[in-house]
């Protein structure tokens, strides 16, 4: 792992992302390609990295999320954690619409979007150019993809679903607790981990993937 994240956060997994809120617009994990190639597949010019920037600094960039009659600005910060490259997404990023392209040639992709303004949070798993399964967090009984039931055993083991794959698990937990359980189950299934410092002061290579964001933080 590179960019200061090697071995970090292994005990944290990804369940903490359920509480990330508006601090990030998405996190995309890819296994089988390095971070620079992930950035390229998401629309970046690999030779045009800015930064490295921290998660705090990236919010000081000139990013226009919504632009009438045109795309907004999309920015990513990339690194590695364990076997997976990752891209932390900000603004009008490209992870969702390029999911199958990113997952071509044997690459695996797990994509999480918090969606605080339009719940539920969304999770997709893609491989070999196809979305195999996806669902909304706390709405796991409604699934899509080529193999929509792929992660049902993990969700049942985590108490999110009953063995029928439809009935909610026991306990009547609030949605926030269910989201954490689901992300914990997915993280264990794929060996995913992300240190919390990624959304804070850890500096990572930063790329524009859409639009024309101002890539230099004010005051520099």
Image (tube, helix red, strand yellow):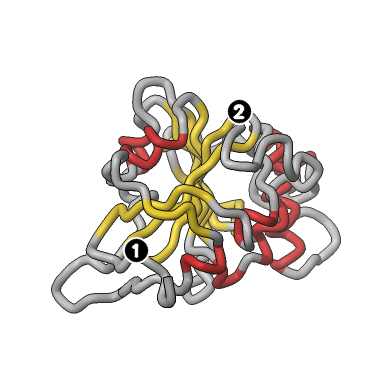
Q: Residue at x 32, y 38 (%)?
A: 41
Q: Is residue 207 left or right of residue 174?
A: left
Q: Secondary structure at mark 1?
A: loop
Q: Position of residue 144 (x, y in %)?
A: 46, 45
**Residue at x 64%, y 49% (from the top left corner):** 166
- Residue receiving disc 1: 215
Q: Residue 160, percent across and down?
A: 74, 51
Quarter of the image holding residue 36?
A: top left
Quarter of the image where the C terminus is located: bottom left
Residue 65: x %, y % from top left:
33, 72
**Which is more foreground, mark 1 or mark 2?**
1
Q: Is residue 96 above or below residue 39?
A: below
| Quarter of the figure with residue 9 | top right
Q: Position of residue 159 (x, y in %)?
A: 80, 48
Q: Nearer the viewer, residue 56 or 132?
A: 56
* Residue identified by numbered label 2: 83
Which residue is situated farthest in the right direction here? Answer: 171
Q: CA distance from mark 1 to mark 2?
A: 29 Å
* Along the viewing direction, whichever of 28 and 7 lies nearer the viewer: 7
Q: What element does badge 2 sit on? A: loop
Residue drawn at x 34%, y 63% as measured from the top left: 215
If the image is split into quadrants, where does the N terminus sit?
top right
Can you say whether 116 is above or below 127 in the image? below
Along the line of sight, the residue nearer the viewer: 15 or 34: 34
């Amino acid at each position: 792992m590179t960019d200061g994240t090697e071995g970090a956060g292994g005990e944290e997994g990804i369940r903490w992302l359920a509480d990330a809120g508006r601090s990030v617009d998405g996190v995309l994990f890819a296994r089988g390609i390095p971070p620079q190639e992930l950035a390229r597949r998401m629309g970046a010019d690999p030779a045009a990295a800015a930064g490295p920037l921290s998660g705090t600094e990236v919010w000081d960039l000139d990013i226009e999320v919504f632009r009438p009659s045109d795309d907004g600005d999309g920015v990513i910060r990339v690194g590695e954690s364990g076997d997976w490259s990752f891209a932390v997404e900000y603004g009008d990023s490209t992870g969702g619409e390029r999911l199958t392209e990113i997952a071509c040639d044997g690459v695996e992709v797990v994509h999480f979007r918090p969606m605080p303004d339009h719940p539920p949070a969304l999770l997709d798993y893609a491989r070999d150019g196809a979305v195999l399964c996806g669902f909304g967090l706390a709405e796991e009984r409604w699934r899509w993809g080529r193999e929509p039931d792929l992660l049902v055993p993990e969700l049942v083991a985590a108490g999110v679903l009953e063995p029928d794959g439809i009935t909610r698990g026991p306990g009547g937990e609030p949605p926030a607790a269910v989201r954490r359980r689901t992300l914990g189950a997915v993280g264990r299934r794929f060996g995913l981990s992300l240190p919390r410092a990624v959304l804070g002061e850890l500096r990572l290579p930063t790329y524009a993937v859409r639009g024309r964001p101002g890539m230099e933080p004010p005051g520099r």
